[in-house]
Structures are given as structure tokens and as C-alpha cells.
Amino acid sequence: MTEKLRDLLHDRAADVDFPTPDLDVLVRAGDRRVRRRRGAVLGGSLAALAVAAALVAPVLTDDGSPDAASGRDAVTLPLDIVSWADGSVLHAGPAELDLGVTIRAFVQTTVGYVVVDADGRVLSLVDGETTEVGSIESGRPRLVGDHDSALVGWVDSSGERPTFVVLDQAADKVALEDSSATEAGMGDLADESDPAYFYAIDGETAYWRDQRGAVAVSVVTGEVDVIDADARNGFDLIDVQDGVLAFYGAQGVEVGETRASARPLRDVLDGNVLESNGVLSPLATMFAPDSEQVRVVGRNGTPLAPSLPTSYFFSTVYEWADDETVRVIALEADDPSADLFSCSILTSGCTLLIDGAGAEGELQLPTGETLGG
Amino acid sequence: MTRRDEFAEFVTGRSGALHRAAYLMVGDRALAQDLVQEALVKTYAAWPRLRDKGNAEAYCRKAITTTAISWFRRKSWSHERPSESLPSGADGGHADSVTQSQWLWEGLQQLPPRQRAAIVLRYYEDLTEVQTAEAMGCAVGTVKSQVSAGIAKLREHLGDDADLLPLTDLVVNR
């Protein structure tokens, strides 16, 4: 008896012809999509926020130190608070700092902020001082940091071959530079084949991919541990927190202390990938995958997703404030401006932090990468 | 073979079948094209992460299905609003003016998107319940209930011709 229904479906499907899609259009759109990260479809203008202090930019001198002769005030932005960038202005809660240069990407550390500007300069902001500490040649800069560390890493491609750089903001110095297993011509993007790619920093350990595969490098001793010799590109290791690694493997997101012991997270994804990125909580007890509707799961696969108003058609976690609180970016269908929320995993409740937070191409979040590609 | 070459081979070989399945899910040729284009863009973006390129079609099918359901939810672009109960139908002289197949097709188009997707995946794509659950991003029990509810509504819609539809899937096993 099922044949009638099957026949109907096959007859109807056979009645229509479709042209082969334009491959160039698909590839161009796909390339743009690849460059997008976490809620890249942003637009709108920044809504008025009660600003406690309207502050001006310290001007950089030739040696990278602030220009005292400019007469402008040095500004210390608060830490451990919601932060975002809009054009050249870095916001931290109620405070703001105009750097005078377009902010392409930034991260927050335990002692300050690290920013990549439109010229690829890496700027360290600590205690009101802005110092140029390096450069990123890539058109798509990537910084990696850790919520409880003063270390920030990136790949410097300005030399003959890519160099992994780790800045210690607390010590105000570059703690590590390593190009021992890279070679000229290696890419630095996640989806390139054989890239020199900085995965993550966890505590005092840096994780990157070079010609050895995925490696863990002690920033203190320089000791190297190859954790996945088969790592092919920037997608293989998603995040590391508290010594726990989130890999992307044949069964989707796989979490564990080592590659061999990592186990798939139930109900996060299948082996075919839909959500291959995301962020572990600080104690690695939960994982928030990139998705179109905010999702959080426990290590055992238990869904723990907070509740946002249904008017938001898009929402995803972009960082953990602590092990029980996530920060979420959300979009409403009729409002091009993105909102930022704080959501409690314990209560599932969400609080609006920022009502409207910048136009596409202008708004950046502390993920270390450029939103909108 | 480059990423683009591999993807081009996939598009050339499978876009026709993907379009037809999408058409059955949305009932509109232009929307099906939009849906498949969106799914193919997602597939191309995910290409480096597909460890087994043989999974590309399953990935794309999942993108089509979840995007179709999502589009319905967000944009409500269905001209025929899904309803809890369909208008009763194939009684008496109605069969004189509308063919049985047309009536069944109309009934299918009035189902809620998740029920329609589940039926298309099970009866057109011939996927198992597990495969259907994977494509819809839901549990197997949800597939069973969605198919069962959809078939029940179609049987109600068909009236006297209800025996043309399967009875087995009316049993819900959660």
C-alpha cells in the first residue's frame, strides 16, 4: 500500500527539470561562508549604550609606545566583563577606548586586551598603554587566548616561513617564537591543506598544527608533544580547556585528555558535520557548538541550552564568562542589529547585555577572529 | 584533484536528485532551487571537514532538510499554511474533477514541514528511520511520530481512498 505514495512522489519529482547550479556562484558563496565565524551575518548600527567614560586613543609612536606628547589620556579598560569592538572603538562594559585604527580582531586576557588592526599590527593594551608587539600578514587574522591566562598566540607570516608567536602580556614580552616545523608556502587558514595554524592556548601550553601534525608546546620549557600526527588542517582541534581537548573526528566533536581517549559528544553532531566548531567551558564540563540556535551540552551529551526569546531566529554562544555562564550573540528577523546576552546554564535564564552591537564589518567579538570574513 | 574539482564532480552528479527531493519537500520549483543552492554552499564550505567525501550527499541532504524546516519556521514562505487537520476530501464526485494523485499531492503540501520532510525522506529517498533521523537532526522516535502523524492526516484527507496509504507507519514506537 505504500506504493501509491511512492509512485506519487517519484512521478511528481520526475515532472520537473532543474538546471545544473552555477559552480562559480556556489564556490564564491562557499568561500565567503568559510570565512565567516560564529554569527557572521551581522548588520545594523550600534545602539546607544550608557557610556561611563568617553575616552580617546593613545597614539602609537614609531617604536610602538604610546605618544605621551599627544596629550591624550591613557585609558585602562576593565577586564572580566563583556567586550566588543565597533570600528576603531573597543568597548568593555560601560567603558570605551578609541584606538584610532580599525579593529579587525581581538581577545581579552587576564591582564589586558590584544588587538589586530586593519594594517595587520598586533597591539597589546595593558594598564592604559598600547604597544605594537607583532604583525599578522594574513587577510584573515587569528588570535588565540585563554580566559585564565595572560598568553596570546598568533602566526606571523611576514618572514621566510610561518612563525608561531606567543606573547606573555603579564611579562610584557614575547615568550615563544617557533618556526622549527614550518616551511615557506604553508598557508595559515583552517581549510587550507597543510597549514601552519594556531589552534588554542590552555594555561601555559600552546596548541598548533605544523608539519608534525597537531602539537602541544609548553610555553615555559619549549617541550613538544605531538598529540595528533594525522591532523590535516585547522579543523582537527577545536578547543582546549583545563587539559581537556575537543577534537573534530570521524564521529563529530570528540572530547578527552588525549586523541586516543577522546569520545564523541552525543547529540552534538554526526560524522557528516554540521557544527564542527564551538567552545569548551573553562573546566571542560560543557561544550557550546556553533549553531543557528544557541546550544550547550554536557560532556555526557545532556542538553543544557539556555532560553532566549523566540523572536531571535539566530543565536550562538561565542564565549564562556565562567563555567556556568555563556555569552550569546543573537539576531532578530526584523532587526539587523545584533544583541549580546549573558545566559546562565544553571537557570537557563538569559539577560540582555547589549541591545544592538555594530554593523557587519564593524562589529567584532573577543573570539580572536574577524566576524564577517 | 582539487577541492573545487571534487565539489564540481559532486554537483554535476547529484544536484538533479537533490533538487527533486527538495522540490517534494517545498512543493515549489523556484524555492527548491534556492534551497539546494543554499545547501550546496554549506556543503562546499564544509568540504575540507568531510573526512569521507562519500558523506557529501548525506551532509547536503541534511542541510536541505534542516534548512527547509528552518525556512518555514522563520519566514513562513509556505503559501499553503500547515494545519493541524486537513480539509476532508476524496468523497463522492470529487474524484471526477481532481485525480487521486493530485488530491494526495495537495494533502502532502498542506502537512507541516517536518511531517512532509519525514515522509519525503522515508518514501521518496527510501531512507531508513535512522537515516531519516540523521537527515532531520532529530531522534528516531521523532521520525516515527512525524511520519505517523503525516500519514494519518493524509488518510483523513483522502477519505474513502485512505487505503491507498500505508497503515504500518501509523504505529508510533517512541
Image (tube, coloured by chain):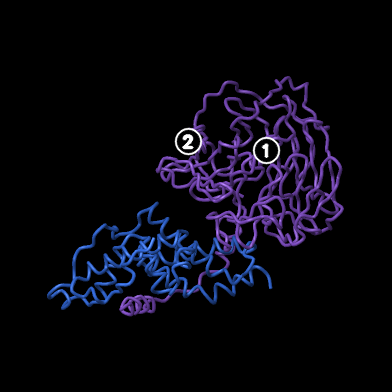
Chain colours: A purple, B blue
- The location of residue B145, given as percent across then percent down, is 36, 61
Please tell me how crowded label 1 is: few (under 14), some (14-19), or many (20+) other residues with Cα within 10 Å. many
Q: Is residue A47 left or right of residue B44?
A: left
Eye-nearest disc, 1 or 2:
2
Q: CA distance from mark 1 to mark 2?
A: 28 Å
Secondary structure beneath label 1:
strand
| Residue at (44% x, 47% y) in the render | A313
Vertical relation: A129 (above or below) A217: above
The chain carrying label 1 is A
| Camera-side residue of A144 and A85 | A144
- The location of residue A362, given as percent across then percent down, is 59, 40
The image quarter in which residue A326 lies: top right
| Residue at (77% x, 58% y) in the render | A213
Vertical relation: A244 (above or below) A91: below
- The location of residue B107, given as percent across then percent down, is 27, 67
Closer to the chain start, of discs 1 and 2, is: 1
The image quarter in which residue A150 lies: top right
Taking the view exactly as shown, the residue that stands out farthest to the front is B173
Look at the image and tell me in which quarter the N terminus of chain B lies: bottom right
| Camera-side residue of A134 and B118 | B118
| Residue at (72% x, 42% y) in the render | A202
Identify the amino acid type marked 2. Thr
Q: What residue would you read off at disc 1?
A: A107
Vertical relation: A13 (above or below) A178: below
Vertical relation: B153 (above or below) A100: below
